[in-house]
């Protein structure tokens, strides 16, 4: 299947945005990035040098030096190295990570319809108790979505939030894992890693509906299945054959499920899935639509990423926000016209 006109338009919009705004913004951060690299080299150097100094003194009497000048020379070199690395740290303090998020997010937000903002759990001002409470709230919402089961630990990273027409929306980076323990040790298995989105409406859905892309549908009964072991949640068929092989739907209110997953709504989902090739899960329950999208992308900047990789990561975040906005607007339309 060829790309839809809407996909082609979005890709062209991003390329223009990259050339005119994002690439210059990244170039403006080059000096901060150089400082950040030197700063981290300094931190690494201090740690290694202190370790070598401790190792040197710990083995001083067991090493057979031919002359007293050798230990003095070795210690002098280590001391000079320590001074040099401390100098690097002191003279290269920077806000590269913070400025990267602010500048790039500002460009992204300017090119979306909703007023998005970046929420961090480690802003330097919140108390540990407040940070923990905030994280626990996001984890509770992930668990409430029932989109995954069989995990033991959940961690939540940076969050992007918005309020649009009295609808609260938040997209967070989530990692859900469980631990496998054997006689030889233990290791973690990833159940889900990616974006977790909640669109909170001001009216409740009549029933509950759970959806996933066909390629992912084995997880209705597999090891990473949805947490919906209830007899009233049954397989639901759509009335549009073009999408029957694309999504698998289960609901306790088939009529509502068909009304929400109309051809227009399905077309938006399919276009995004076709462009990104990532399996989606949806849960509609109470007043919220929950969505999970697998991803290994981390918005936090690193020093080893190429410009092309940076471009890919920024595009994925912008595509995500555009997708959420389209889904939200269609849900709001349904909300106004159908929900009681």
Image (tube, helix red, strand yellow):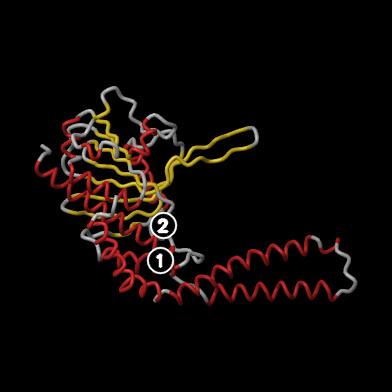
Badge 2 marks a residue whose secondary structure is loop
Residue 257, image x and y in percent? 20, 35
| Secondary structure of the residue carrying numbered label 1 | helix
Viewer-side residue, 243 vs 256: 243
Disc 1 crowd, CA 10 A, few/some/many (<14, 14-19, 20+) = few
**Residue in the picture at 54% in, 75% down:** 90
Q: Nearer the viewer, mark 1 or mark 2?
A: 1
Q: Can you say whether 139 is above or below 116 in the image?
A: above
- Point 35% across, 57% down: residue: 316
- Residue 242 location, x and y as percent? 23, 40
- Residue 322: x and y in percent read 26, 56
**Which residue is drawn at the image coordinates 73% and 62% (left, top)?**
54
Q: Earlier in the sequence, mark 1 or mark 2?
A: 1
Residue lying furthest front in this view? Answer: 1
Query: From the viewer's perspective, is 298 left or right of 110?
Result: right
Expressed as whole percent of the image width and height from the top left, the position of residue 44 reads 60, 65
Quadrant position of residue 210: top left
Q: On screen, 15 above or below 287?
A: below
Residue 132 against residue 12 in the figure, above or below: above
Picture disc at residue 122: 2
Identify the disc placed on residue 43: none
Label 1: which residue? 98
Q: CA distance from mark 1 to mark 2?
A: 11 Å
Q: Residue furthest top?
A: 231
Report the front residue among 36 and 87.
Answer: 36
Q: Which residue is found at the position 33% from the left and 72% from the top?
A: 19
């Amino acid at each position: 299947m060829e790309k839809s006109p809407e996909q082609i338009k979005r890709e062209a919009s991003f390329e223009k945005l990259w050339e005119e705004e994002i690439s210059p913004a990244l170039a403006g951060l080059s000096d901060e990035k150089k400082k950040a690299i030197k700063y981290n080299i300094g931190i690494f150097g201090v740690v290694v040098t202190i370790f070598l100094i401790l190792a040197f003194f710990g083995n001083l009497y067991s090493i057979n030096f031919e002359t007293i000048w050798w230990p003095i020379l070795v210690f002098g070199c280590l001391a000079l190295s320590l001074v040099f690395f401390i100098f690097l740290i002191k003279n290269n303090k920077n806000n590269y990570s913070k400025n990267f998020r602010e500048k790039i997010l500002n460009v992204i937000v300017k090119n979306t319809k909703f007023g998005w903002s970046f929420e961090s759990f480690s802003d330097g001002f919140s108390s540990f108790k407040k940070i923990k409470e905030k994280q626990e709230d996001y984890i509770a919402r992930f668990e409430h979505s029932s989109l995954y089961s069989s995990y033991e630990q959940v961690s939540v990273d940076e969050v992007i939030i918005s309020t649009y027409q009295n609808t609260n929306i938040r997209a967070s980076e989530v990692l859900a894992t469980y631990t496998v323990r054997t006689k030889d040790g233990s290791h973690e298995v990833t159940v889900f890693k990616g974006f977790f989105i909640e669109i909170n409406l001001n009216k409740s859905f009549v029933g509950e509906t759970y959806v996933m892309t066909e390629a992912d549908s084995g997880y209705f009964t597999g090891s990473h299945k949805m947490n919906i072991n209830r007899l009233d949640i049954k397989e639901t068929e759509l009335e549009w054959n073009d999408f029957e092989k694309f999504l698998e739907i289960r609901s306790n209110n088939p009529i509502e499920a068909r009304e929400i997953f109309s051809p227009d709504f399905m077309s938006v989902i399919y276009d995004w899935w076709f462009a990104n090739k990532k399996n989606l899960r949806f849960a509609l329950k109470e007043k919220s639509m929950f969505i999970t999208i697998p991803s290994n992308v981390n918005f936090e900047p690193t020093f080893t990423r190429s410009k092309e990789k940076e471009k890919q990561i920024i595009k994925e975040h912008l595509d995500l926000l555009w997708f959420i906005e389209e889904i939200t607007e269609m849900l709001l339309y349904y909300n106004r016209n159908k929900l009681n």
